[in-house]
Image: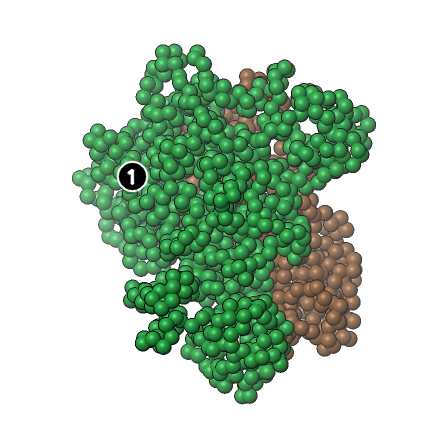
Chain colours: A brown, B green
């Protein structure tokens, strides 16, 4: 059976059901006299509770393609600024003090004891006793028309500084990697909640039915500390969890046909399966069977689309050069190029994790004057290329790019367990750190928030992780206070009871 | 129509809700009619979180009290004088309630007025009232719908179902064909397809249905199937979670669950042993293992984390999980404020926390306390020591030393160290003093013991450690040398007897080591008396054996053990849920809205367990019945399995829910197998699941049960079935979790050297519940089929239908191997036609219909032609030169992807 006729079958089936259902639902309401209460409960709900055909049939009101395909596109409740998100997470947490948050006073205070007033009531992961202040280990300059500060560690990025809006005083109350990453991606440091990408994919579906709606790409040789929960779907249906695509091995687990099985044979296999499933439907009338027929068709198409989009070899040389890709390897540069390809293809949410930013100064690779420079070099060109490439394709207006870590780092030099350490490093610090956003709806060249003279605390424009989430949802066309999912007898939202849209960085 | 007892029962609550709006004179029911309006429109601002104007509608006394304005919101008997009603009618938008929201409709306002005029009687939600005796409804055998469905009524359950069907003018389906029901039953009871021998016996009429049920209930695989369900609730996993997510030896607990289920341990006992096995008199090893239920909380070994923070997180998880598992109640929100909708108060959360706050575990990397499993030989030594102590001491002394041998408690954790000078908590976990280093511990009570035991290792020789009372000039209580150790060991040194609780000062000297080098690394210390019988022949040998046993490395499982009196923790309310902001001190107590506490219960976890399994508890039995029913039908009577309370939808069959709950507690004496048998013996369960579009429209979720259940198999079952029908499945039970093949590069854990070490031999083909669960990186194909990563309690797996699932069963080598095995068996048939039918029937337990046979035959022919033309492809595919086998493998792979294969009909 061809794809067209299958689609027609499903579509016709749906239309019949919608019509019958609407009529029947109305009658049921009258017959049982359930009155206005229950019905208005349905109507007033801001939920998109679509957990499959049965649930939708039950509601009777909005049986849509969604019910056979949980990733079918849904319009956001409000006019969106962007359609997709690319989130660049520097796992381990980069030092804002060597990249964006220029603190000349800190340089003057280098090697002096940290004032006790800063230490009182503060908890650090590793700093004990009285640490010394550590001046910025990089030169800074104001760049672009905006005149925002960027360090010498990011020479390429200086070219696109006017595209981005900085948040200089983001705060988090978590100072360990795992919980802080969970907080950054699920709105809570504890497990069990959906990630931002899951919320977004649940709310909007995907524009491309042959690719996963929420793709995760990792580099740096390690998964993020919090594991797969940072792209988990929590209490949302698991279809909305992030799908990890890999540069090595199968790009998506089990996407490759078994060796020796041709595409034609796979097509015939799926045709045979679906033919039999249709016979089964005739007997059981269970709409789940129709959904399954649809999913097998999608799986077949996905097997072609995923390897295609994950192959960067076919990109022109100038593009490869622009990003600095290394085909065949798992690198941040490759992942940036893949991110562009994925959003170009209509993928809703692309999450990058790059491991290796935990600059404690325990060795060469984690010293802020050594290893950190390497890490900056690894991301500088690719993330700059990503913004330029999106822009030259007209995609930047429809895409939100977010950059950050799970927290920031201390202006103090780490003295692990009170010991003098051989390399210069900084401990975890969540009171004020830098993130940036670029893309549709973002005020270009903005800089919101300011830290004190040594970069320890916010003095102005402090924003929370919840505010970042509220802003992301806003740009995608959601009111974060109304975007909820009922679970355990109450509506849950990404921002819990917090969050305010950061208007200062909106265009 | 005969009188419906069913309706009479319903009258008070559900039915009146349904009739609301048509009825003006009838008494208004608070729980079903008023409460939903309050919860929907009022409680956000006047409830557990906010009490705007000093008014809250959550608790009766608050609602009837004066607000900040001095006016009473509700004056019973007088709606027009009640400020609440006045505000609903207000024209001024500043005064009209709900504030800045649409007004209530007239119907709702009328109802609220009637309720107040009738006396504003508060009522308990049905979920907080114990189930009362229920009469089984009887159908008229002459009239109605029964004749053509005379097989339907098999037991009392069916009368309840029938009553509701009749109301909706539906009739039940015919019974499912024997083959269908045999497969359904086998999956529901054992999680596996039926054994051919039983399947044949039953379908050919040589075995009664009840015999089949009893046989399946007696299978060891019964415990494995139902353990999968319970382990989701218990959040069982093989790793600790969080960043490092190191392995945890937990499988003894998994095995305990399987055995308990197979032994049909009554649910009250099953509950008590898991929540408080350690507090039972003279607990057995099994009862101690059972307490690992609450040691499935996560443990954070990430560098720089504060143990107390994550200890508290575990304790909170235990409160939340206990309420989710036994009470269908979400307590999480009560951590920060009174429950938003249900009558649970903020303080009550901490009363509950107090039950769990006194366990010894403190988020340390060793996960102490852990129960040690000695070898048979060592067990003999253990007994010998016990006998010695009994002979020369007494029972109490013998128990004390025995406990120290099997779980090393009580001891002091080193992370409470204060005031380090030249020292640190190495890796934030081990007490490590550098040369000239010191620190101290407060409130150390040695019980006057003359011996210090401590667990440590040292990398260097020449350290002298001194323990003093109070400070660096205090009385020397112990002084000893520390030299390099081969590994971490437990050691005993003499200690000056002190009666009082003291500050214990530690100092270390080492003249050869460089500064800032750890002289030793201590993980705990403890105080013990001398073994009794000093001076008696053999005492020295016993003492040596005691120390040797302590140092024996054994398999372990983390367990719950209560702190002794002198180490008791005080529980205090957290302000807005923040563990660093503590307010009032609280003691253990259960929520007032639920069943009363009995004096004879101890105020600890044991008492809590007794309270939960008391027949007066309104939620325990209902919760279990609702979830077991869900396992079998894919629906609960209360649709939200997580929540029975004012926010949950009314039950579909309230009388049946209560009838089954009472029967479970009384006639069935809390036995799970009896409950399951009651349900699967019913005609309701045995119906065909065939449907038609009209029926699916009338009752899409099958809440009325006019058809049998039709559900996709679970993650474990999808894999187990493929292995079972192809003959690959191992029947081996128990033991350490296994690592069947998974794609390379799935495990990429930060700061961990642990790897996926692929299992060999039959361990590659074990049932899914034995697969190793690493929380941050669970077995990928299970995750595609909606399994839980077991980080938190999972009450229900949302069933999804996705292309990634298709990719697993089409392409995962596990499924290819199974298809290949099945194809080999198909080849034994006489010809291709029978071969295809044989494979299908073996897999699906049905006869292959002609149209389906044709689809598979065509696939076979095409595959055969392809492989004959392209022998290279064939070689790549299976490494075989047998085109027929390769083509049959393609067909088998298709069979194992059919909806009828991965669904139980």
| Quadrant of the drawing holding the N terminus of chain B | top left
At 66% from the left and 40% from the top, the residue drawn is B48
Which quadrant of the figure has residue A449? bottom right
Residue B717 visible at all: no
Residue A404: horizontal and vertical position, in percent? 65, 59
At 30% from the left and 28% from the top, the residue drawn is B177
At 74% from the left and 54% from the top, the residue drawn is A444
Answer with left or right where residue B5 lies relative to residue A112. Answer: left
**The numbered mark 1 sits on a residue in which chain?**
B
Task: Please count the marks in the image.
Answer: 1
Answer with left or right where residue B855 lies relative to residue A49. Answer: left
Residue A383: horizontal and vertical position, in percent? 63, 60
Q: Residue furthest left?
A: B830
Q: Residues within 10 Å of mark 1 (few under 14, many from 20)?
A: many
As rendered, which of B381 and B884 lies closer to the eye?
B381
Quick check: A259 above or below B647? below
As rendered, which of A107 and B274 lies closer to the eye?
B274
Residue B786 visible at all: yes
- The kind of secondary structure element at disc 1 is helix
| Quadrant of the drawing holding the C terminus of chain B | top left
As rendered, which of A125 and A367 lies closer to the eye?
A125
Answer with left or right where residue B817 lies relative to residue B560. Answer: left
Quick check: B482 above or below B445? below
Which quadrant of the figure has residue A266? top left
Residue linked to disc 1? B216
Answer with left or right where residue A426 lies relative to residue B703. Answer: right
Q: Residue furthest bottom?
A: B512
Residue B486: horizontal and vertical position, in percent? 42, 78
At 43% from the left and 40% from the top, the residue drawn is A296
Residue A184: horizontal and vertical position, in percent? 62, 54
């Amino acid at each position: 059976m061809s794809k067209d006729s299958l689609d027609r079958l499903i579509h016709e089936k749906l239309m019949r059901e919608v019509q019958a259902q609407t009529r029947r639902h109305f009658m049921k309401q009258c017959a049982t006299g359930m009155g206005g209460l229950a019905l208005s409960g349905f109507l007033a709900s801001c939920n998109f509770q679509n957990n499959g055909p049965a649930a939708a049939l039950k509601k009777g009101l909005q049986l849509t393609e969604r019910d056979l395909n949980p990733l079918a596109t849904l319009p956001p409740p409000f006019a969106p600024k962007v359609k997709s998100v690319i989130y660049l997470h520097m796992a381990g947490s980069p030092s804002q003090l060597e990249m964006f948050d220029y603190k000349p006073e800190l340089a003057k205070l280098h090697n002096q004891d940290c004032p006790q007033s800063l230490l009182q009531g503060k908890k650090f992961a590793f700093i004990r006793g009285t640490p010394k202040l550590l001046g910025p280990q990089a030169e800074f300059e104001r760049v672009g028309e905006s005149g925002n500060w960027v360090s010498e560690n990011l020479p390429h990025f200086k070219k696109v500084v006017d595209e981005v809006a900085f948040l200089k005083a983001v705060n988090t109350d978590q100072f360990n990697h795992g919980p802080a990453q969970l907080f950054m991606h699920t709105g809570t440091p504890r497990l069990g909640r959906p990630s931002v990408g899951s919320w977004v994919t649940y709310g909007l579906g995907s524009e491309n039915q042959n690719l996963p709606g929420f793709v995760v790409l990792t580099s740096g040789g390690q998964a993020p500390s919090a594991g797969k929960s940072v792209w988990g779907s929590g209490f949302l249906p698991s279809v909305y969890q992030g799908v990890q695509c890999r540069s090595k091995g199968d790009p998506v687990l089990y996407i490759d046909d078994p060796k020796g099985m041709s595409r034609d044979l796979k097509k015939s296999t799926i045709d045979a399966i679906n033919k039999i499933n249709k016979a089964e439907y005739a007997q059981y009338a269970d709409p789940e069977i129709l959904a399954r027929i649809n999913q097998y068709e999608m799986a077949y198409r996905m097997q072609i689309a995923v390897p295609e989009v994950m192959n960067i070899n076919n990109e022109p040389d100038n593009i490869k050069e622009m990003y600095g890709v290394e085909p065949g390897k798992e690198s941040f540069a490759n992942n940036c190029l893949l991110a562009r390809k994925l959003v170009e293809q209509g993928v809703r949410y692309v999450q990058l994790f790059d491991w290796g930013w935990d600059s404690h100064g325990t060795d060469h690779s984690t010293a802020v004057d050594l290893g950190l420079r390497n890490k900056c070099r690894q991301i500088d060109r690719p993330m700059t290329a990503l913004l330029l490439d999106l822009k030259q394709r007209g995609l930047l207006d429809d895409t939100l790019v977010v950059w950050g870590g799970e927290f920031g780092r201390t202006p103090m030099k780490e003295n692990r367990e009170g010991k003098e350490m051989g390399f210069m490093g900084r401990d975890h610090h969540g009171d004020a750190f830098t993130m940036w956003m670029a893309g549709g709806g973002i005020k270009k060249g903005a800089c919101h928030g300011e830290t004190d003279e040594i970069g320890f605390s916010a003095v102005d424009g402090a924003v929370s992780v919840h505010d970042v989430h509220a802003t992301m949802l806003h740009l995608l066309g959601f009111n974060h206070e109304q975007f909820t999912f009922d679970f355990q007898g109450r509506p849950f939202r990404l921002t819990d009871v917090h969050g305010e849209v950061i208007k200062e960085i909106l265009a | 129509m005969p009188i419906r007892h069913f309706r009479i029962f319903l009258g008070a609550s559900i039915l009146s809700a349904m009739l609301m709006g048509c009825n003006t004179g009838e008494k208004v029911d608070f729980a079903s009619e008023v409460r939903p309006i309050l919860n929907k429109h009022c409680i956000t601002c006047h409830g557990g979180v906010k009490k705007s104007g000093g008014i809250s509608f959550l608790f009766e006394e608050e609602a009837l009290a004066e607000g900040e304005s001095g006016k009473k919101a509700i004056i019973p008997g007088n709606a027009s004088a009640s400020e609440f009603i006045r505000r609903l009618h207000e024209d001024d938008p500043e005064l009209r309630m709900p504030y800045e929201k649409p007004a209530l409709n007239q119907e709702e306002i009328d109802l609220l007025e009637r309720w107040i005029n009738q006396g504003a009687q508060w009522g308990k939600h049905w979920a907080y009232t114990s189930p009362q005796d229920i009469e089984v409804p009887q159908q008229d055998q002459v009239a109605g719908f029964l004749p053509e469905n005379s097989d339907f009524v098999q037991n009392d359950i069916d009368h309840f179902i029938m009553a509701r069907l009749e109301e909706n003018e539906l009739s039940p389906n015919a019974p499912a064909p024997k083959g269908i029901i045999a497969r359904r039953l086998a999956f529901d009871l054992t999680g596996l397809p039926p054994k051919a021998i039983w399947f044949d016996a039953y379908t050919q009429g040589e075995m009664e249905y009840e015999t089949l049920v009893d046989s399946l209930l007696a299978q060891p695989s019964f415990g494995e199937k139902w353990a999968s369900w319970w382990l989701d609730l218990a959040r069982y996993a093989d790793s600790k979670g969080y960043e490092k997510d190191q392995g945890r030896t937990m499988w003894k607990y998994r095995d305990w669950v399987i055995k308990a289920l197979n032994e049909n341990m009554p649910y009250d006992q099953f509950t008590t042993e898991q929540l408080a096995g350690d507090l039972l008199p003279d607990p057995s090893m099994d009862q101690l293992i059972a307490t690992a239920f609450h040691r499935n909380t996560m443990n954070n070994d990430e560098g720089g984390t504060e143990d107390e923070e994550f200890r508290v997180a575990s304790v909170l998880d235990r409160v939340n999980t206990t309420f989710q598992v036994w009470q269908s109640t979400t307590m999480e929100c009560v951590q920060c404020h009174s429950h938003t909708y249900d009558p649970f108060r903020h303080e009550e959360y901490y009363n509950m926390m107090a039950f769990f706050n006194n366990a010894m575990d403190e988020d340390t990397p060793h996960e102490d306390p852990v129960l040690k499993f000695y070898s048979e030989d060592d067990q003999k030594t253990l007994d010998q020591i016990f006998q010695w102590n009994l002979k020369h001491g007494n029972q109490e002394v013998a128990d004390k030393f025995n406990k120290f041998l099997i779980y090393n408690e009580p001891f002091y954790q080193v992370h409470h160290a204060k005031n380090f000078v030249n020292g640190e908590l190495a890796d934030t976990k081990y007490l490590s003093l550098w040369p000239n280093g010191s620190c101290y511990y407060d409130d150390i009570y040695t019980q006057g013991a003359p011996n210090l035991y401590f667990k440590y290792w040292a990398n260097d020789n020449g350290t002298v450690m001194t323990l003093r009372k109070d400070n660096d000039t205090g009385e020397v209580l112990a002084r000893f040398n520390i030299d390099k150790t081969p590994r971490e060991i437990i050691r005993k040194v003499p200690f000056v007897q002190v009666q009082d609780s003291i500050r214990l000062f530690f100092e270390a000297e080492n003249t050869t080591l460089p500064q800032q080098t750890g002289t030793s690394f201590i993980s705990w210390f403890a105080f013990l008396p001398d073994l009794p019988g000093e001076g008696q022949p053999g005492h020295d040998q016993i003492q040596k054996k005691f120390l040797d046993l302590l140092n024996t490395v054994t398999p372990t499982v983390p367990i719950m053990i209560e702190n002794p009196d002198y180490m008791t923790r005080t529980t205090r309310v957290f302000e807005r849920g923040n563990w660093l902001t503590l307010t009032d001190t609280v003691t253990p107590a259960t929520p007032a809205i639920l069943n009363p506490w009995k004096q004879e219960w101890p105020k600890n976890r044991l008492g809590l367990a007794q309270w939960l399994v008391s027949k007066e508890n309104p939620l325990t039995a209902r919760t279990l019945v609702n979830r077991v029913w869900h396992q079998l039908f894919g629906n609960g009577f209360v649709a939200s399995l997580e929540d029975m309370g004012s926010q949950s939808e009314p039950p579909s069959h309230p009388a049946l829910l209560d009838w089954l709950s009472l029967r479970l507690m009384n006639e069935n004496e809390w036995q799970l197998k009896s409950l399951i048998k009651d349900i699967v013996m019913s005609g309701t369960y045995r119906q065909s699941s065939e449907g038609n579009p009209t029926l699916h429209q009338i009752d899409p979720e099958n809440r009325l049960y006019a058809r049998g259940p039709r559900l996709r198999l679970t993650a474990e079952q999808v894999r187990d079935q493929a292995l079972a029908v192809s003959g690959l499945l191992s029947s081996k039970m128990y033991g350490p979790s296994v690592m069947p093949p998974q794609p390379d590069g799935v495990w990429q854990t930060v700061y961990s050297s642990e790897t996926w070490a692929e299992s060999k031999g039959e361990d590659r083909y074990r049932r899914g519940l034995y697969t190793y669960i690493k929380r941050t990186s669970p077995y990928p194909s299970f995750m595609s089929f909606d399994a839980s990563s077991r980080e938190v309690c999972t009450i229900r797996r949302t069933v999804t239908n996705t292309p990634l699932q298709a990719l697993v069963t089409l392409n995962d080598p596990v499924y290819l191997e199974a298809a290949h095995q099945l194809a080999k068996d198909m080849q034994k048939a006489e010809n291709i036609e029978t071969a295809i039918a044989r494979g299908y029937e073996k897999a699906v337990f049905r006869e292959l219909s002609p149209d389906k046979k044709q689809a598979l035959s065509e696939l076979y022919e095409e595959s055969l032609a392809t492989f004959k033309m392209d022998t290279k492809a064939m070689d790549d595919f299976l490494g075989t030169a047998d085109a027929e086998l390769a083509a049959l493998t393609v067909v088998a792979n298709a069979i194992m992807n059919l909806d009828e294969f991965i669904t139980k009909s």
